[in-house]
Image (cartoon, rainbow, N blue to C red):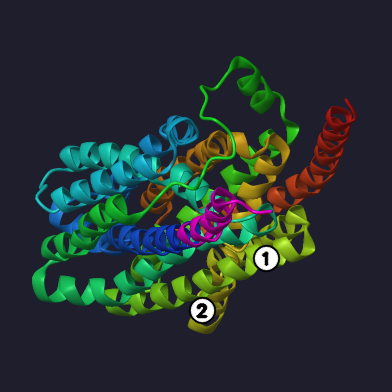
Amino acid sequence: MLTHTHVESAAAFPRSAALDKRKRAHTVWLLVLCMAAHGLTFTAIPLLLPLIRFDLAISFTDAGILTAAATLSYALGQIPAGLLADRFGPRRPFFIGLIGWSLLSFSFAFIHGLWLAVACQFIAGAFRAMMFAPGLSLLASWFPPQRRATAMSLYMVGGFGGQIALALAGPLLASFYGWRIALMALAAPGIIGAFAFRSFAADAPRRHAAAQLTWSDVARVTRSTVMWLCCALQFVRFTAVIAFIVWLPSLLVADHGFSMQSAGFIVAAGAALTAASNMVGGYVSDRLRNPPLVIGGTFAVLACATWLLGTVQSELPLFAAIAMGAIFLQFYFGPIFLVPVEALGPRLAGTATGVGNLFANIGGFVTAYAFGAIKDHTGSFASGYRGVSVLCFAGVMLSIMLARARTRALELAKGAAAFRNSG
């Protein structure tokens, strides 16, 4: 016979489940909107770079240093950000990262010298690092394991939404008010969104107690073949991302003679294709349960697209190469971050994400600087895009190795779980 206490307890479960569902909806949508606000400023400087170069009187190499500064600090901040997310929950680091990045993006509009701009970007990159691993971990934590590649892909949808809006509105704002006023206007939504996120977003209920990272955890990460292969793949992945997102507007304007408005429209169309395919890639990976296949196939397409970008001169093949690259640029985003979490377990999700993205941004740092230097020395970006193509082909080979290592890691994990259950 049920007592009054049992009835109250039973009634509490539906209320708790409904509350968790509302928290998840609020958190997911707020995070996506915050990433959209972040996307406005993340792509603002690459898109407005021709105007910034003219205003600050800097070369392409100097522009590469400016971009590389933010990428370097972003890379160095990945592991600390992942550790903070695992230790304290991802919500607070994400807020700190977004508000810091947005305020420094706003401040960039008041800078008139190269090295002060480099310093501003370097500090801003460290704050931006606080967004990535915590944000990705926060999204994944609100979804069941079989849907986490899709959830991780959702993280990028907001960012590409912001890039689309920026690519369409940014050149118009800059033409009417100048790039400085445009940048301040684009940074304002990030500041507002950060405080909305702080007020209404929530960490998912933890399935394990918060704990400091132990030496055994560090050893598991450093000994993992899957982790090292994913780090190499991340290096290649972000070289392609920087080649498309940071340098594509300059390629269109400087090498092909497009206006900034035309380049903005092309970038917006590409970002729309990337945003849509990002979710599809996560869904396909979850359905096939074979992330390495998705990763390897994506690198094969990107190898072709980046080679064409460095080779073709006429508009129609150029647009085809841009569309091909845009569709597959982040098709494997969810899968490539999911595989280390599969191997190491959800308790180390933030740390694994931070380590992987550290290597991604080392690749991004090299690419950000190298493309500017290549342009100044050769007069075009062609050699840079062909180099990225070779790296993407290497990514196909690494994906085959990852498939074998992942199979072994999952078999070992299953055997260990069976041994613990039998004991």
Residue 267, image x, y percentages = 40, 72
Asked if residue 42 is among those painted magenta in the image, a careful observer would answer no
Regarding residue 380, the answer to whether it shows in the image is no
Instruction: Quarter of the image for the C terminus: give it.
Output: top right
Q: Is residue 141 left or right of residue 407?
A: left
* Whether residue 266 is situated above or below residue 40 in the rendered picture: below
Label 1 crowd bin: few (<14), some (14–19), many (20+), radius 10 Å: some
Indicate the quadrant where residue 42 lies: bottom left
> What residue does disc 2 label?
319
**Cβ atoms under marks 1 and 2 closer than 8 Å:** no
55 or 71, nearer to the observer: 71
Indicate the quadrant where residue 182 lies: bottom left
- State which region is magenta: 1-19
Q: Is residue 176 left or right of residue 360?
A: left
Residue 38, image x, y percentages = 32, 57
Mark 1 lies on a secondary structure that is helix
* Callout 1 amino acid: Val
* Callout 2 amino acid: Phe
Regarding residue 166, the answer to whether it shows in the image is yes
> What residue does disc 1 label?
301
423 or 411, nearer to the observer: 423
Mark 2 lies on a secondary structure that is helix
Picture residue at 78% right of the left edge, 56% below the top? 290
Asked if residue 2 is among those painted magenta in the image, a careful observer would answer yes
Picture residue at 49% right of the left edge, 59% below the top? 15
Residue 411, image x, y percentages = 87, 39
Residue 313, image x, y percentages = 50, 75
